[in-house]
Image: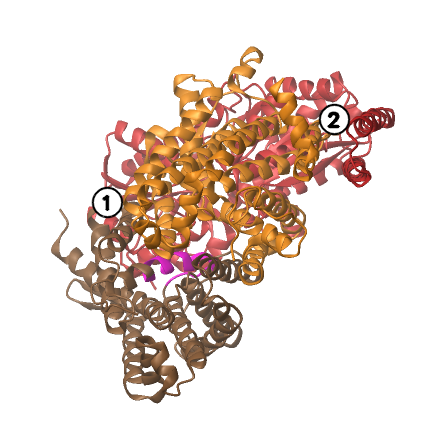
């Protein structure tokens, strides 16, 4: 009965009501798309959710800890490949594989954190770009993971569909992504509200001051990295089950993975808990729309969709560095955030 | 086994291409040193320089070497514009805004060019493209040789500019101590414009030179930007001299190492080298501690 | 449809009303919920396509790289398809369906496997195509064909050459072009023939290839078959086509290994770069043998000019085959009249692919109707599986079209061409299609004009 009580309480407050509406819409939309045969909309929604998961994870490092990463494609790719390899070579179900993928990505993150966390701000960003490229090049030459040909999983018979999570179209995967996003929120929310969350923000504001207060920046950065890489890797796992094909060019791509994640996070607002989700849901449809309706109609202008991304990113950086959520809050459309335990950014 | 003449050729080759790396690196070093801003889009201004040359050559038959001043000026103007509209606004902003702003500029230039010019590779065919000088077993292609001397000329000119002209000295003053320079009556803001403009202009000259012997396409900037970062980190930001030498060194290293390791791993080595350097000695070999 | 929507709307409304009564939610919140639901439903309804296919037209989906770096090739392939379909429709369309016209519906893969897959899904579920054609890049064909296999839509692949595509046990995938292993074997035959003719001058072989699946699979096949045939592989170099700016180190490495023959697998821009760098660095192997792709592209031919002379390439097709294949000459003349360029390996393969699909459509039309989509698709699939087209009906230098149980056409073969000093590729092998004697060894750069 505790659950019902929790829901009742939650719905009493404004935020809770918004949440309920959004959740309801998210749950119903895929059914509508499916019934009306709208694969484009379903695909777009799935991408929004995947980027939501990954941008939120990314923001753990950026908004909370102040480490800007342009290399999250590494975790995405590692998660995707791990899930695929487990599925293909060891017949492990992706229900488990996705989480293992996330874990492997998290471990890779920890390993990378050791040398890289010594670097501050722009050095760190540059290094993450370099690491992303290195992983891509390694996977291209590595035969075990299929090299440049990548890996494709075979189509499984009807009775194994649930085991291998193989379904046509994006519809089923939207629910998978929703579940994983929910899981992520459940884990991240208490995390950032806790002491650890405060420490991370302290590190972001002034690492040296934090150190003088007895906070070990390295240790907490590692914690942030662990969860950041974990969920990004899980995002990769979703990609694997949805497309059933991974290759280094797709999953380790700087622009379409790392930069997209970064833009989603920054657009939505890095100082807001749900900012990255908002950012994804605004940014992905724009990008897809430009790509499908403008670039495809006029292939002469290929590259235009990324140009538009650049414009968006520039506008955000110059005009609204705190993203959509930051802007909304400044204009007074949102409730104060003291209750939700987030530190205001002056 | 790899013969000595192959190595010799590789060294010469590396010096010639390294001189172009030096130009792109010098520009980055200047911007970095004066404003402490990392211009992620450095390679893309170089690409613009290459395309200015291409269009001048294709549409008006202008010899690429004559278009050096043209591509410098056009890119200089664009650089000043970028500085005014973008960089100025984020100079004192949190790091994340700086990084994302310059990265956004990168996306806009690179993909704007791609949308405008088409994603296809283009080449310029100069009349002297096939001229090759041979000294024993070493072969030198004329366009590359010319590129080397032009780049050397530009570097020398730049050095003289910094040491003897008022603007040059003012720039150095600003890089050493912004507040003091301001108090001395130097218009710091204008200096920033000039610094950024020259920084990307020099890079564009590199692009012009490269266009004479290599194919150009809108995404070529990425590679040169990476090299520029390695060059600057290796040679130390703020040190123009250091950047030039280090460009040559990087060119030679890349060229020679390709003989011994698979060329496709060449990129991995470059990236690893970059990470290693910033981990170990971020101020570079010739760097001086700034601010 | 409308009934379903009304019912859904009613259910939602009553639920919301009950919620309001029990919880006392504010009016504005209620309004918000209603508005959101209405928007979603309205958008969905507006996006709905019109009803099922009329039997005046049969829709065939095509996924190709129409934008991005391979857009030139995509345009080539598109031309081949459109030309064939135009011919077919002019000749009376699908006669077994009362003259129904074939309509091609294009999807742009932009060169990416995920995009290709998404487009395939759209074509299948929204456009309700009866079959799929495409997609050039093996990586994209992989995902597109997986979608087709899953939705039970027959796919005809005229141009992807990765051997793995027909090694997956798919039942709905058919490929007309020979694949890279078949081509590699033919390369060995050619080199053996060259050696017999010119006194065994080729012993050492170097390979340079781009590093995506196509280049890598080609290189592997080469290594396997040439080693088996007793040749010595002295160097294998790979590079990344999309970002390569200079091939100096690659060429130098090859030069240092001193091969007699260089095998090249490149796309257009890198092919141009390869040739020009080879010239600049004065790299003179006895012969250069390419695996079409970039080397047969008209853009390459134009840009590389006389530097491309005397390079061999495996090809699937060549303009001068018209001298040996009468049907080809006739088709090429008409194609050239319309588009101003000759058919090339890409447009010719897609042209052929469209015709092969047409034959299958004719067969299928006898047994099923497009009104029942599922049945019709299955009928097409069955028709393809049992197709047997004799060589003289084709413009390709093939013995015919007949698919094995994996969907691979076993009767195809390639040819080897060489660019002569008139700037055109001439067929030199196999002998029954040859129109010229090969020039061997390749004249050194310094000896040329």
Q: Chain of mark 2?
A: A
Question: Which residue carries the number 2 mark?
Answer: A35
Q: Position of residue A258 (x, y in %)?
A: 46, 46
Task: Examine the rendered structure and indicate whether residue C424 appears above or below residue B197.
Answer: above
For image coordinates 32% across by 47% down, the residue present is A117
Dot label at residue C226: none
Question: Which residue carries the number 1 mark?
Answer: C259
The secondary structure type at the circle numbered 1 is: loop
For image coordinates 34% across by 89% down, the residue present is B166
Query: Which is more toward the observer, A46 or B192?
Result: B192
Task: Examine the rendered structure and indicate whether residue A263 appears above or below residue B102.
Answer: above
**Drawn side of residue A243 relative to residue B240, left or right:** right
Q: Position of residue B52 (x, y in %)?
A: 48, 71
Q: Position of residue A78 (x, y in %)?
A: 40, 34
User: Residues at marks 2 and 1, common chain?
Assistant: no
Q: Residue furthest top?
A: A159
Visual hue assigned to chain B: brown
Visual hue assigned to chain A: orange
Provide the residue span drawn in magenta: B214-228
């Amino acid at each position: 009965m505790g659950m019902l009580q929790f829901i009742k309480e939650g719905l009493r407050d404004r935020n809770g009501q918004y949440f309920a509406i959004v959740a309801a819409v998210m749950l119903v939309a895929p059914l509508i798309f499916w019934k009306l045969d709208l694969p484009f909309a379903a695909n777009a929604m799935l991408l929004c959710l995947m980027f939501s998961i990954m941008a939120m994870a990314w923001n753990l490092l950026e908004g909370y800890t102040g480490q800007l990463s342009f290399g999250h494609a590494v975790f995405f790719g590692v998660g995707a490949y791990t899930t695929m390899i487990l599925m293909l070579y060891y017949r492990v179900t992706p229900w488990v594989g996705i989480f293992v993928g996330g874990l492997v990505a998290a471990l890779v993150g920890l390993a990378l954190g050791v040398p890289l966390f010594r670097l501050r701000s722009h050095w760190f960003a540059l290094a993450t770009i370099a690491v992303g490229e290195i992983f891509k090049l390694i996977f291209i030459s590595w035969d075990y993971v299929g090299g440049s040909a990548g890996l494709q999983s075979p189509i499984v018979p009807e009775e194994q569909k649930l085991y291998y999570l193989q379904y046509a179209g994006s519809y089923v995967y939207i629910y998978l992504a929703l579940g994983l996003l929910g899981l992520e929120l459940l884990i991240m929310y208490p995390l950032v509200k806790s002491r650890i969350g405060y420490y991370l923000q302290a590190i972001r504001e002034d690492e040296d001051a934090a150190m003088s207060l007895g906070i070990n920046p390295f240790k907490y950065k590692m914690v942030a990295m662990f969860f950041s890489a974990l969920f990004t890797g899980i995002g990769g796992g979703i990609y694997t089950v949805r497309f059933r094909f991974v290759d280094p060019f797709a999953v380790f791509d700087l622009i379409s993975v790392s930069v997209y994640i970064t833009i989603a996070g920054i657009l939505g607002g890095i100082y807001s808990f749900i900012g990255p989700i908002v950012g994804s849901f605004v940014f992905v449809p724009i990008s897809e729309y430009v790509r499908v309706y403008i670039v495809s109609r006029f292939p002469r202008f290929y590259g235009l969709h990324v140009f538009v991304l650049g414009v968006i990113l520039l506008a955000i950086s110059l005009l609204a560095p705190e993203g959509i959520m930051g802007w909304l809050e400044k204009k007074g459309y949102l409730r104060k955030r003291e209750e939700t335990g987030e530190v205001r950014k002056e | 086994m790899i013969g000595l003449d192959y190595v010799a050729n590789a060294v010469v080759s590396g010096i010639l291409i390294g001189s172009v790396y030096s130009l792109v690196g010098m520009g980055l070093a200047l911007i970095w040193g004066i404003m402490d801003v990392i211009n992620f889009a450095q390679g893309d201004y170089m690409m613009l320089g290459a395309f200015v040359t291409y269009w001048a050559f294709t549409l008006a038959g202008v010899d690429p070497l004559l278009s050096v001043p043209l591509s410098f000026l056009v890119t200089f103007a664009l650089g000043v514009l970028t500085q005014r509209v973008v960089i100025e606004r984020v100079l004192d902003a949190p790091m994340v805004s700086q990084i994302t702003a310059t990265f956004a500029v990168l996306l806009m230039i690179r993909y704007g060019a791609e949308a405008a010019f088409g994603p296809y590779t283009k080449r310029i065919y100069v009349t002297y493209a096939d001229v090759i000088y041979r000294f024993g077993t070493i072969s030198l292609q004329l366009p590359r040789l010319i590129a080397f001397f032009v780049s050397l000329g530009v570097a020398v000119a730049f050095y003289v500019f910094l040491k003897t002209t008022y603007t040059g000295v003012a720039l150095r003053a600003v890089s050493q101590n912004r507040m003091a320079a301001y108090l001395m009556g130097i218009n710091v803001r204008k200096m920033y414009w000039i610094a950024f403009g020259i920084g990307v202009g020099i890079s564009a000259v590199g692009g012009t030179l490269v266009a004479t012997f290599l194919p150009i396409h809108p995404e070529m900037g990425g590679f040169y930007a990476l090299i520029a970062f390695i060059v600057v980190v290796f040679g130390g930001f703020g040190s123009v001299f250091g950047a030039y030498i280090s460009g040559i060194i990087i060119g030679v290293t890349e060229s020679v190492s390709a003989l011994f390791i698979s060329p496709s791993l060449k990129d991995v080595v470059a990236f690893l080298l970059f990470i290693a350097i910033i981990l170990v000695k971020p101020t570079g070999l010739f760097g001086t501690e700034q601010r | 449809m409308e009934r379903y929507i009304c019912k859904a709307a009613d259910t939602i409304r009553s639920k919301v009303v009950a919620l309001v009564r029990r919880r006392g939610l504010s009016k504005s919140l209620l309004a918000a919920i209603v508005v959101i639901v209405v928007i979603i439903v309205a958008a969905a309804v507006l996006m709905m396509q019109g009803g099922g296919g009329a039997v005046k037209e049969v829709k065939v989906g095509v996924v190709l790289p129409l934008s991005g770096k391979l857009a030139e090739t995509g345009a080539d392939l598109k031309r081949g398809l459109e030309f064939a379909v135009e011919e077919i429709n002019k000749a009376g369309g699908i006669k077994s369906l009362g003259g129904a016209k074939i309509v091609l519906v294009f999807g742009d893969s932009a060169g990416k496997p995920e995009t290709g897959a998404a487009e395939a899904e759209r074509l299948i579920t929204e456009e309700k195509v009866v079959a799929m054609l495409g997609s050039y890049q093996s990586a994209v064909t992989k995902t597109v064909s997986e979608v087709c296999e899953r939705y039970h839509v027959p796919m005809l692949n005229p141009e992807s050459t990765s051997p793995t595509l027909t090694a997956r046990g798919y039942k709905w995938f058919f490929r007309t072009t020979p694949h890279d292993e078949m081509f590699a074997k033919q390369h060995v035959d050619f080199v053996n023939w060259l050696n017999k003719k010119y006194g065994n001058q080729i012993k050492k072989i170097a390979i340079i290839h781009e590093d995506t699946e196509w280049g890598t699979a080609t290189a592997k096949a080469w290594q396997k078959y040439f080693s088996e045939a007793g040749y010595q592989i002295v160097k294998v170099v790979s590079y990344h086509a999309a970002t390569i700016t200079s091939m100096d180190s690659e060429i130098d490495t090859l030069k240092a290994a001193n091969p007699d023959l260089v095998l090249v697998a490149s796309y257009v821009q890198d092919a141009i770069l390869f040739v020009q760098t080879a010239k600049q660095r004065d790299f003179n192997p006895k012969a250069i043998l390419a695996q079409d792709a970039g080397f047969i592209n008209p853009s390459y031919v134009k840009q590389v000019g006389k530097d491309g002379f005397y390079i061999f390439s495996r090809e699937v097709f060549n303009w001068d085959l018209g001298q040996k294949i009468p049907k080809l000459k006739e088709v090429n003349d008409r194609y050239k009249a319309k588009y101003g360029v000759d058919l090339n390996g890409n447009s010719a393969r897609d042209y052929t692919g469209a015709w092969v699909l047409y034959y299958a459509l004719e067969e299928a039309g006898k047994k099923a109707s497009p009104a029942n989509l599922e049945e019709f698709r299955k009928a097409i699939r069955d028709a393809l599986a049992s197709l047997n087209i004799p060589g003289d009906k084709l413009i390709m230098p093939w013995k015919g079209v007949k698919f094995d149980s994996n969907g691979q056409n076993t009767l195809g073969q390639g040819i080897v061409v060489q660019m002569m000093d008139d700037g055109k590729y001439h067929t030199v092998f196999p002998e029954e299609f040859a129109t010229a004697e090969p020039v061997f060894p390749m004249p050194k750069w310094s000896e040329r004009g």
